[in-house]
Image (cartoon, rainbow, N blue to C red):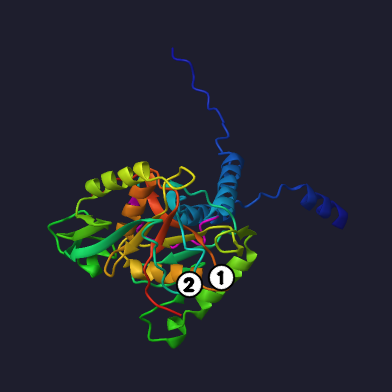
Amino acid sequence: MTAAINREVSEREVPLQTTPMIDVTFQLLVFFLCTLRFQTLEGKLSAHLPRDVGSGAVAAGPLEKVGVRIEVVEEGRKVAEGSPGRPYDPSRDGRAYDFVGRVLRYSLGPRATEDLGTLRSWLAEQARVTPGEDGRPRPCAIDARPGVRYGEVVRVLDLASEVGFQEIAFVGGVERG
Amino acid sequence: MPAPRRSIDLDLGINMTPMIDCCFQLIIFFIVTIDMGQKELESLELPPARAAVPDEPATKRPILNVDHEGRVFIRRRLTYDPTSADPRLRDPREVQEQLARWARAMPRRYDEVARREIPDEPLLVRADRNVPFAHVQRVLEWCAREGVRIWKVELAAAEGREEGR
């Protein structure tokens, strides 16, 4: 009698309860979809730091390097990114802001300009006219004065790279020792 | 006379197996690809640059992030904050030590200008486009220090966008 019951139980089909598994699977799927961060396509510009000096500030040799100095003439005012008419509000706009009325002066030797196009032509001229001993453009040294932003330095670095400078360094210093 | 309707007993149960298979495949895909190679990239507003070359993430490359307030993040951890009330965060030694560790791990080559062996791999510096450059300059100065001597740097920029030209 007992053996017959056991056989009956073993032959009965046991349905697999898949609903909780599907629930969990979908939860996981939704979680991963929500947290997915697509790979950011970034670029990079190469620059060099002086190799022949110790710590602290360094000076650019005026005869060996093409020196570009960046200075802030007008600080300008912060506005919301993409909305020049709206003042920047950190609580609303986060950290993204632009400047309106900001003026920078770019100096290349005795010449100075506030226009990036002019600076580009000067840099191109320097890269072409005064090559170094090996025929390549001389090193370019960017001297960013206080108040200049990272993006503004990158813009000049970008121009220098575009016109053919291969060795670009930074001069000036914040602290010593 | 219309034909008598026959009731057809169809089993309309949905076959869940392929769907579950697909879901698991997707989950495995997400687990494998999630945030790989970007663990060290802080969320920053990068400046655009036309001459920027594409950054191809490599594993174990040194990356240093400087946010819009000049704070330094390494591997998603705040390691230096010049304006912090916490003196430990105002102390740059941790960043300097990390730079020295990176420099020691880099392949070296003899340099004629420096007249010594120096690290020969770049450090990727990612900074917010609106951070004063002095904060980045400070990091570059730490790189140039004795015991570190990282002289190749790459400044991160957003590729291809045009702005303010």
Q: Is residue B151 above or below residue A162?
A: below
Q: Are marks 1 and 2 in contact (CB under 8 Å)?
A: yes
Label 1 belongs to which residue?
B148
Q: Is residue B105 left or right of residue B63?
A: right
In the rendered view, would you say A139 is above or below B142? above
In the image, residue B101 lies at what x, y percent?
60, 70
Mark 2: amino acid: Trp
**How many numbered marks, from 0 up?**
2
Task: Please name the residue shown 35% across and 70% down the image.
Answer: B134
| Closest to the observer, A71 or B111 | B111
Give the labeled residue for mark 2.
B142
| Residue in front for this viewpoint, A132 or B118 | A132
Whether residue A115 is visible, yes or no, is yes
Residues beneath discs 1 and 2 located on the same chain? yes
Of all chains, the one bearing label 1 is: B
Residues drawn in magenta: B37-48
Q: Secondary structure at mark 1?
A: loop
Q: Position of residue A156 (x, y in %)?
A: 32, 53
* As drawn, A41 above or below A110: above
